[in-house]
Image (spheres, grey):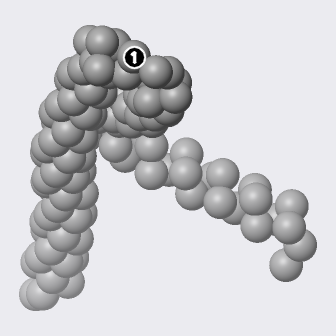
Amino acid sequence: MSIVNKFVSSFFSLVRILSISWKSSRKWTLLSTLFMGLEIISGLGVLYLLKQMVDVVTTVLAEPEAAENVKSVLYYVVLTGLGTLAYVISRSLAGFSRETQGMMVADYVDNIVQKTAISVDLAFMKALFITTP
């Protein structure tokens, strides 16, 4: 199978999955996407803040009056801590929304299977009553 065919089949599978997810619960699909985006952005923000903190620490330690410039280091330590807190909260919310969305999708698919099974059973019973004398 060529790479293009694999890509096309993967794309159609993704469209089917997103369609089922959207039909099962629009609200949780949107919330899950929003929280995952916040998780990614806050994670990148924490990395940037860690880089800034390392830069400030190395700059302050290189100066002769390092003890006097502790406020700038503490500022970035607190900012990095708050960023990390935001990341952990967004990660928890993203996990909660994924779990809830997963339950909604499972219920939706179970309902489809149940409706199909009932219609097949009813069709069988109807055919059975028509054919018996």
> What residue is disc 1 on?
65
Q: Residue at x 45, y 43 (%)?
A: 18
Q: Residue at x 19, y 70 (%)?
A: 117
Is 117 situated above or below 56? below
Is 10 situated above or below 92? below
Q: Which part of the image, by quadrant, shows the C terminus?
A: bottom left
Is 57 situated above or below 100? above
Q: Residue at x 66, y 52 (%)?
A: 11
Residue 47's quadrant in the figure?
top left
In percent of width and height, residue 15 lies at 55, 45
Q: Nearer the viewer, residue 116 or 94?
A: 94
Label 1: element kind: loop
Q: Residue at x 16, y 50 (%)?
A: 99
- Is residue 128 at all visible to an observer of this figure? yes
Q: How busy is the neighbourhood of tag 1: few (under 14 within 10 Å), some, or many (20 plus)?
A: few
In percent of width and height, residue 105 lies at 23, 50
Residue 72's quadrant in the figure?
top left
Amino acid type assigned to the residue bearing label 1 in the image = Glu
Q: Viewed as shown, does residue 75 lie left or right of 114?
A: right
Q: Viewed as shown, does residue 102 lie left or right of 52?
A: left
Residue 124's quadrant in the figure?
bottom left
In percent of width and height, residue 115 lies at 17, 58
